[in-house]
């Protein structure tokens, strides 16, 4: 069972993650919970970013923390 904790993230961390995703978008970037779940379960995911403002939060509740 996974437990998701809501916390405040510093804006500088958000900016760095956003910049990293923009710079490395070479066609291998997966978007959406289905694609992320597949790549995580296959073991090919290197870095997973979960949005803090997903509504309803149950959309990402199935992603285990040990895969993130």
Image (cartoon, helix red, strand yellow):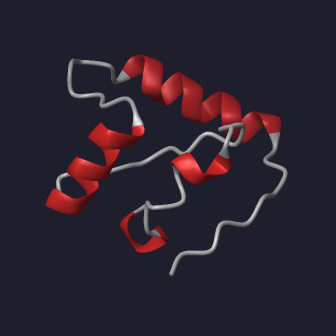
Considering only vertical position in the picture, is 24 above or below 42? Answer: above
- Position of 32 with respect to 59 (left or right) is left
Residue 45 horizontal/vertical position (percent):
26, 51
Residue 1 horizontal/vertical position (percent):
50, 81
Is residue 43 in sight in this rendering? no
Considering only vertical position in the picture, is 18 above or below 6? Answer: above
Which residue lies at the image location 76% right of the left edge and 35% below the top edge?
12
- Name which quarter of the figure residue 52 lies in: top right
Residue 42 horizontal/vertical position (percent):
15, 58
- Name which quarter of the figure residue 34 lies in: top left
Q: Nearer the viewer, residue 55 or 21?
A: 55
Q: Nearer the viewer, residue 66 or 17?
A: 66
- Looking at the rendering, in which quadrant would you find the C terminus? bottom left
Considering only vertical position in the picture, is 7 above or below 21? Answer: below
Which residue lies at the image location 68% right of the left edge and 38% below the top edge?
55
Which residue lies at the image location 47% right of the left edge and 29% below the top edge?
20
Q: Nearer the viewer, residue 3 or 59?
A: 59
Considering only vertical position in the picture, is 38 above or below 64? Answer: above
Is residue 27 in sight in this rendering? yes
- Position of 60 with respect to 7 (left or right) is left
């Amino acid at each position: 069972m996974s437990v998701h904790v809501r916390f405040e993230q510093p804006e500088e961390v958000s900016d760095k993650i956003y910049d990293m995703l923009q710079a490395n978008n070479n066609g291998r970037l997966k978007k959406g919970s289905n694609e992320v779940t597949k790549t995580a379960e296959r073991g090919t995911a290197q870095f997973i970013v979960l949005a803090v403002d997903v509504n309803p939060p149950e959309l990402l509740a199935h992603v285990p923390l040990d895969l993130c």
